[in-house]
Amino acid sequence: VRKLFLSQNPLCVECMQKGKITPARVVDHIQRIADGGARFDFANLQALCDQCHNKKSGREAHNKKG
């Protein structure tokens, strides 16, 4: 699923929103699996670069603690 998704979505969506072109390396679940997100539904996936994925994961971890 990862390979197929990245072949169809090769650029980081967060960077593109900022006007930057960055290759995506991570397929991220928009809604976490632990929170009920669908594991293999393309509608719940987004392509991210490593930096954007790490930022998102940090935000999610921080929000879980609060």
Image: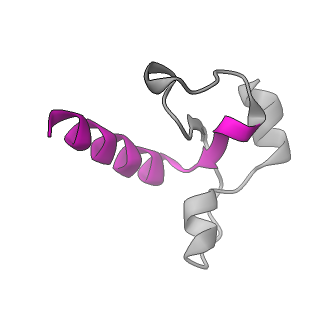
Residue 57 painted magenta: yes
Residue furthest out toward the bottom? 19
Name which residue lies at 32% across and 41% down: 60
Q: How many marks do you count on the picture?
A: 0
In this picture, is 8 found above or below 15? above
Q: Position of residue 33 (x, y in %)?
A: 51, 22
Horizontal arrangement in the rendering, residue 50 relative to residue 27 (left or right): left
Q: Position of residue 23 (x, y in %)?
A: 65, 55
Depth check: give the residue in front, 33 or 4: 33
Residue furthest out toward the left? 66
Name which residue lies at 63% across and 69% down: 16
Q: Quadrant of the N terminus?
A: top right
Q: Position of residue 50 (x, y in %)?
A: 48, 46
Name which residue lies at 65% across and 46% down: 47
Q: Position of residue 40 (x, y in %)?
A: 72, 22
Q: How is the image coloured?
A: one colour
Name which residue lies at 56% across and 37% down: 28
Q: Quadrant of the C terminus?
A: top left
In this picture, is 5 found above or below 48? above
**Is the stretch drawn in magenta largely helix, strand or loop?**
helix
Horizontal arrangement in the rendering, residue 19 relative to residue 11 (left or right): left
Residue 30 lies in quadrant: top right
Horizontal arrangement in the rendering, residue 65 relative to residue 34 (left or right): left
Depth check: give the residue in front, 43 or 46: 43
In this picture, is 18 found above or below 43? below
Horizontal arrangement in the rendering, residue 15 relative to residue 63 (left or right): right
Q: Which residues are magenta?
A: 43-66
